[in-house]
């Protein structure tokens, strides 16, 4: 249910004495500590930007709570305040696991945010009953849910080359089909990377009982259409016995680690050895090592140099990417596809 994607909406203001404080919020289950943190970060974002820049939406992480927020700050004229203006923010809170939906579609939310901000500024500027702000937040929540439902429906109804396992009608136009295994420790962003590549956020094909997520993507390589069948191998230890069966017949390998977690970097070479030990075909697959989450600059624990060093040791290509922003996703899989074509 898309209505469960939104965990709360928070309206905050800057008070001259108390600083940033939450004024209204739609979910009473949000803790006071989270509400205060949302208010501080949202209004701090506004103060570091010009009023014009603040019209854009920002996505802010709250890792201690496994939450993120899509935030819009704004100002309005207020002669009673020092400087003649007051500032506020509207924040939509969602689970960290659902962030790809909000990253992918955040531009679609701008018009709905513009509308609620306009109404709140009108209420504040005209000194109207502030209970009207609560009504605006409730209406805002309904509009967001409706928009999310429309986006979800469009994804499911869209005829796409990424639907699996149904074959495309023009499958005879494909030059080749390649199996590409995507592996690495749990929570490194494997599924998010694949969803970014295939441009799907609400839907996925997942077989949790055996620990593999299978998707496909048709790409053009030097004028030829090829299909990459992407096997997202679960990183949990309980699936270890099944992995050897998933590796068999792999033409390509994408080995992911998390740049913010040094242990996943240390385990990357173990993954590669496990794959090579269990692959039965004579030809070794085209492989690449990839450090994910390079957008989290301040949380990074693995340097670019260390990534390149490990890739050189393994004899494979190194990439850095962000499954959330999409940086280098297509470059990574185009590299795999191009080299598979060259090999053929």
Image (cartoon, grey):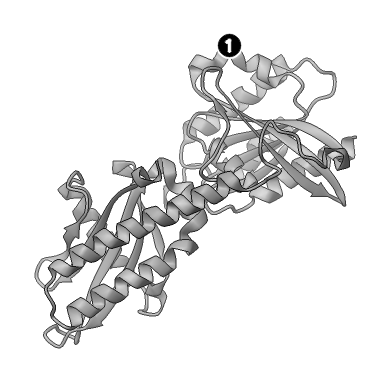
How many labels, in total? 1
The quadrant of the rendering that contains the C terminus is top right
Q: Name the residue located 58 percent from the left edge and 43 percent from the top edge.
A: 195
Q: Name the residue located 67 percent from the left edge and 41 percent from the top edge.
A: 162
Q: Name the residue located 15 percent from the left edge and 88 percent from the top edge.
A: 79
Look at the picture and state if 152 lies above or below 229: below
- Can see residue 89? yes
Residue at far left of view = 17
Local SS, label 1: helix
Q: Which residue is mark 1?
A: 241
Q: Where does the image place residue 300, in percent across and percent down from the top left?
A: 46, 46
Q: Residue 141: name its quadrant.
A: bottom left
Q: Locate residue 325 relative to residue 116 in the image: left or right.
A: right
- Can see residue 62? no
Q: Where does the image place residue 181, in percent across and percent down from the top left?
A: 68, 29
Q: Nearer the viewer, residue 213 or 35?
A: 213
Look at the picture and state if 127 lies above or below 116: below
Q: Locate residue 37 relative to residue 167 in the image: left or right.
A: left
Q: Locate residue 275 relative to residue 150 in the image: left or right.
A: right
Q: Where does the image place residue 121, in percent across and percent down from the top left?
A: 25, 77
Q: Name the residue located 52 percent from the left edge and 54 percent from the top edge.
A: 104
């Amino acid at each position: 249910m898309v209505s469960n994607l939104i965990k709360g909406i928070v309206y905050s203001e800057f008070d001259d004495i108390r600083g940033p404080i939450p004024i209204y919020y739609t979910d009473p289950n949000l803790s006071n500590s989270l509400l205060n943190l949302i208010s501080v970060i949202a209004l701090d974002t506004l103060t570091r930007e010009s009023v014009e820049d603040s019209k854009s939406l920002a996505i802010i992480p709250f890792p201690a709570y496994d939450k993120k927020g899509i935030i819009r700050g704004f100002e309005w004229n207020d002669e009673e305040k020092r400087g003649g203006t007051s500032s506020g923010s509207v924040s939509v809170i969602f689970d960290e696991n659902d962030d790809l939906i909000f990253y992918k579609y955040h531009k679609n939310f701008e018009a709905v945010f513009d509308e609620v901000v306009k109404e709140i500024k009108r209420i504040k500027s005209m000194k109207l009953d502030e209970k009207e702000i609560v009504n605006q937040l409730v209406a805002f929540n309904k509009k967001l849910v409706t928009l999310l439902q429309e986006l979800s429906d469009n994804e499911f109804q869209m005829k796409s080359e990424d639907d699996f396992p149904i074959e495309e009608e023009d499958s005879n136009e494909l030059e080749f089909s390649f199996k590409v295994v995507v592996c690495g420790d749990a929570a490194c962003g494997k599924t998010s990377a694949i969803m970014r590549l295939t441009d799907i956020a609400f839907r996925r094909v997942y077989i949790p009982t055996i620990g593999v997520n299978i998707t496909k993507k048709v790409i053009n390589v030097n004028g030829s259409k090829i299909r990459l069948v992407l096997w997202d191998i679960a990183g949990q230890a309980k699936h270890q016995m099944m992995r050897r069966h998933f590796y068999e017949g792999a033409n390509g390998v994408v080995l992911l680690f998390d740049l913010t977690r040094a242990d996943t970097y240390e385990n990357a070479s173990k993954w590669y050895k496990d794959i090579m030990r269990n692959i039965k075909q004579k030809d070794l697959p085209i492989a690449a090592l990839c450090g994910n989450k390079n957008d989290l600059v301040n949380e990074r624990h693995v340097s670019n140099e260390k990534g390149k060093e490990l890739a050189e040791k393994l004899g494979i290509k190194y990439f850095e990417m962000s499954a959330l922003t999409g940086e280098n996703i297509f470059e990574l899989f185009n590299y795999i596809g191009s080299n598979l074509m060259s090999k053929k």
